[in-house]
Image: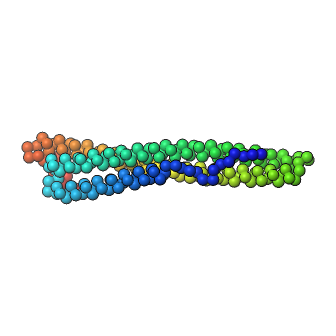
Amino acid sequence: MGLPKIGAVLALDGEREYKSAISGINMAQRSLRAEMKLATENFYEQANGIDALTVKQDILERQQEAQKEKVEVCRQALAKYTLAQEEAGKKVEAATENVRQAETRLTELKNSTGATTEEIRKQEKTVQEARAQLETANREYETASKKETEWKISLTNATAELVKTDRAIEENTRYLSEAEKATDGCATSIDEYGKR
């Protein structure tokens, strides 16, 4: 009985590219956080002034764009690994069925009076191969499941970062609008803001 071959290693193409993209985005985000620290120090005494709020707005908007990219990369990776997990699950089902059929055939041969010792040995080997393929399929499924979970967590964290930045942009926009309307160019509702 010929069994379909199942690859020994689940090849999750693109993982290196996804991780590289995330690494590049994380580097850009670190750079923007450093830029924000510098702006905070440069405008230490004028944190609620138009110039300070404008610089902050620019940095926040660039952070937002980087985070949107990160969310998209995570979405793409999650979709890929969800599909890989589904395909691995199908391989497990097929391998399980192959084991069942091989074992059934072996039992039939052992109970048959007309089966030769050679036929039984060949079928025992077929059962061993089927079980080995099932083990490989189970490992592939576990690997795909782990990767899918990792990317779900990454997507959730990236989305949370984006929501936080969106909120900061909304808040800064309100302060900037207030500062633009003020005669002295400062937002008064954020007197405590300069102490942050």
Q: Is residue 124 visible?
A: yes
Outermost residue to the left: 183
Identity of the residue drawn at 8% across and 43% down: 183
Outermost residue to the right: 113
Q: Position of residue 136 (x, y in %)?
A: 64, 53
Q: Is residue 40 left or right of residue 149?
A: left
Q: Is residue 33 left or right of residue 11?
A: left
Identity of the residue drawn at 13% across and 42% down: 180
Q: Position of residue 57 (x, y in %)?
A: 23, 47
Identity of the residue drawn at 25% across and 54% down: 36
Tag count? 0
**Which residue is more in the foreground, 87 or 122?**
122
**Which residue is more in the foreground, 52 or 9?**
9
Q: Is residue 126 left or right of residue 146?
A: right
Q: In which image quadrant can residue 39 be found?
A: bottom left
Q: How is the image coloured?
A: rainbow
Identity of the residue drawn at 52% across and 46% down: 81
Q: Is residue 153 visible?
A: no
- Quarter occupied by the C terminus: bottom left
Q: Position of residue 68 (x, y in %)?
A: 36, 44
- Quarter occupied by the N terminus: top right
**Which residue is more in the foreground, 194 or 108?**
108
Rendered position, 108 above or below 38 = above
